[in-house]
Image: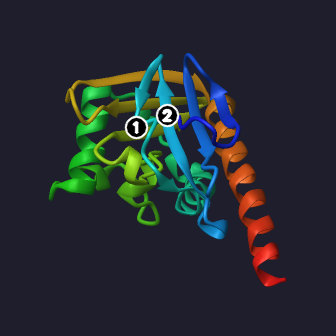
Amino acid sequence: MLEGSGEIRRFGDWDRFCIVTQLDEHYCGVWLNGELFYRIDGQDFGSRYGGVSLRDALYISEYIVETKEKRINKTLYDMAYERLFALIDDAIYGDNEELFQYIDENVFAGDFSISINVQSMLGNKIFAVSYNGKTKIVYCKSEDHKISGLVFDDESIDHAFRKIYEYLKSLHDKEVEKAAL
């Protein structure tokens, strides 16, 4: 993270699943320029020095919060990490439609992505599916291509995304208000 910048904010459990942000010292008002990265199972995902628009992260985190219910699926949840990752990844980035056998028509493959895809996070793929109070996260870091996964209580993941959304929304609303004066 940048020295001399705003306070580092952590949303979630640093060692298990955490979203980390920091507002730049010169954050350009409503653009909310800053830093964002994830920590999953003690590993960093994304760059700590990415220089991103946290305003974009606000809108993406809002979508992740709003689509939580669409990620509930027992059949997908019961799949092995590699199989689950391949189905979602191929449906989003490839031309394989096998995933659509397992999801309702109002659910999109992208609804399973929980990566806040700002510049610092590009190349990292992080997907989630929930069932019975648990969330299974499968992920692949851009530099190593190894598929891994973890299971969490739903509340810990939901809480991290709700809190980052609320924090960024509050910052953005204040900047919009200042700009209107």
Question: Which residue corresponds to the image point at 47% horizontal and 25% vertical from the top-left?
Answer: 40
- Please name whichever residue, 28 or 54, is drawn nearer the observer in this view of the structure: 28
Could you tell me if residue 95 is visible in this image?
yes
- Determine the residue positioned at 30% across, 46% down: 88
Query: Circle 2 sits on which residue?
Result: 38
Q: In which quarter of the image is the C terminus?
A: bottom right
For this orientation, the residue located farthest to the front is 4
Q: Mark number for residue 47?
A: 1
Mark 1–mark 2 Cα distance, whole angstroms, equals 9 Å
Q: Is residue 80 visible?
A: no
Answer with left or right where residue 63 lies relative to residue 139: right
Residue 73 locus on image (x, y percent)? 48, 42
Q: How many marks?
A: 2
User: Mark 1 or mark 2: which is in front?
Assistant: 1
**Hey, which residue is sitting farthest left in the picture?**
95
Please name the colour scheme applied to the rendered image. Answer: rainbow
- The amino acid type found where label 1 is placed reads Ser
In the displayed structure, 37 sits above or below 177; it is above
Position of residue 82 relative to residue 35, above or below, is: above
**Along the viewing direction, whichever of 173 and 153 lies nearer the viewer:** 173
Residue 18 image offset from top left, x and y in percent: 58, 29
Secondary element under disc 2, as helix, strand or loop, is strand
